[in-house]
Image: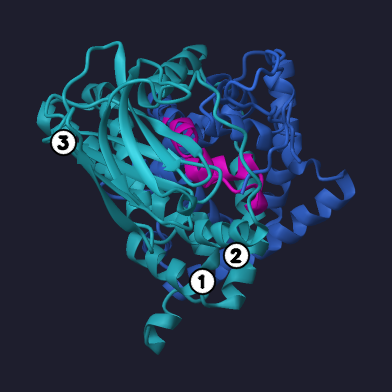
Chain colours: A cyan, B blue
Amino acid sequence: MDLSQARAGHGDTAAYLLGALNETQRVQFEAHVAGCAACLHELEELRSVSDHLALAVAQVDPPAALKARLLRRAQEVLPAIRVAPPAPPAVPESLLAAERTRRLRWWHLSERLAAAITAAALALGLVASGVGFSAHLESQRTAAAAAELADALSIVYQPNMIWRTLTGTDQAPQSKGRLCLNPGGVEAVLMAYDLPRLPSHEVYQLWLNNPEEQQRESGGIFRVDERGRGHVIVRLHSPLGRFQTAGVTREPEKGSPAPTGPRVLAGQL
Amino acid sequence: MLSDRGTPARRFGDGSPAELPVDYNALDDEALVERIAAREVRALEAVYDRYSRPIFSLALKILGEREIAEEVVQEVFLRLWTRAYGYDPHRGKLLSWLLTITHHRAIDELRRRRAQPELEGVQEQFAAAEEPDASPSAALARVEERAVIREALAQLPEAQRIPIEMAYYGGMTQVEISRALGEPLGTIKTRMRLGMQKLRLLLAGYETEGGGQAVTQTHSGDHTR
């Protein structure tokens, strides 16, 4: 970063918090503030003011129907897990600190990414349908899908991510999986290709294994589309680096606490 | 990054007795977010019950149309549902995080829908959001809730207050505000900055005197940590 780039954004803290910067300026400020103690201090100092502004508006109750609609949509976007996850093991404070720093950097960026993708998806939906605002409301499914896509991309585009390949077993020799992870992090994304379609009462489930310590954890369940493509976002409570292998099995509709069905993908991490 | 506070220990097949029913409304924000990350939809419902009102109110103030504001609210809570781990309690309160996302979403939506910024349009939005309350007592309560913060805004010189309101509630960029008010960009930047600093001092004083009630008074059942 040269001097002019480093200065770009300096003094824009108030405008940033008020949302008064355009996209270019916003990106410049976020890059600047990471290396400017004065602006970072001012950002922390003035952040509460934007909260006050948000709460100063006339308070209006949302319509009762909105809650039911939201909870229905939430279940469609990411079904609630009915199988309880294992209790998280203790995580070293050093890892937590590193994770907090990483999230601080990524929080705004991933929000922007999600907003951009959602906007693009909504815009595409409008253009494709060729109708007006009523179509905008109809396209909530598109928006939710875009939000999940943004969620996955916000992980994939994090720094220090590596890719591992899972290959099809005898059960699905043509299938392939690509797992994107940071061994020091707790998030990953599996993308699966050419998996057989499953009946509605079955799903695919990702497993992360540590054979040496006889540990295994579920990475989540997923379905595939008509072309055999699917993905799952993995979120664990401890670093992925402790696992040596990964596999995907066929399981009952709500997933299983341990693998019960045939393995279709397997690979080293 | 999230503590295990409020989350009962759970293991597969360890023979532990069935969990007791959970009173989600009694859990604090951090515990609820942990449960949302574990995809417990009742936890999402509890956060919605707690914070949907200020979030909807902010979206409505900025966008001026109920249907679009509802859409933004839904988007914000879906973001929480799919990205609960993005919330770091060490960085601030959950409500603050949700309001920041709401503001970003609402402003983005407003800018997308508006080809040309017009000051009159912004003022109309202010008026539209000021809906008549259902009853005089409700109206009085709401006025009281906002009084302190509004008073602080009112204490700002007009030259500082107007650019702040145009930016935060009107979704205008500093360049657009500069053009609309016929003032140099540098002047607008300075006025917004001075205004924000003054607001911080005014509201910090209130918080000290009022025991930090400026935020928490605005909604019942708050579990601010």
The amino acid type of the residue labelled 3 equals Ser
Q: Is any atom of residue A179 visible in this view?
A: yes
**Tags 3 and 1 touching, CB below 8 Å:** no
Whole-percent x, y for residue A161 in the image: 36, 59
Q: Which of B93 and B105 is in front in this view?
A: B93
**Is residue A206 highlighted in magenta?**
no
**Tags 3 and 2 touching, CB below 8 Å:** no
Which element is circle 1 on?
helix
Q: Main secondary structure of the magenta part?
A: helix
Which element is circle 2 on?
helix
Residue linked to disc 3: A175
Position above or below: A120 against A105: above
The amino acid type of the residue labelled 1 equals Val
Residue at point 68%, 50% (across, down): B154
Q: Give whichever of discs 3 and 2 has the lower sequence position.
A: 2
> What range is drawn magenta here?
B75-102
Looking at the rendering, which quadrant does residue B173 occupy? bottom left
Q: Local crowd at mark 2 within 10 Å, few (<14), some, or many (≥20)? A: some
Same chain? Circles 1 and 2: yes
Position above or below: A63 against A231: above
Residue linked to disc 1: A33
Q: Which mark is residue A43?
A: 2
Q: In this view, does B108 lie to the left or right of A57?
A: left
Residue at point 20%, 35% (across, down): A169
Position above or below: A13 against B1: below
Q: Give whichever of discs 1 and 2 has the lower sequence position.
A: 1
Distance from Cα at disc 3 to Cα at disc 2:
49 Å
Chain letter for mark 3: A
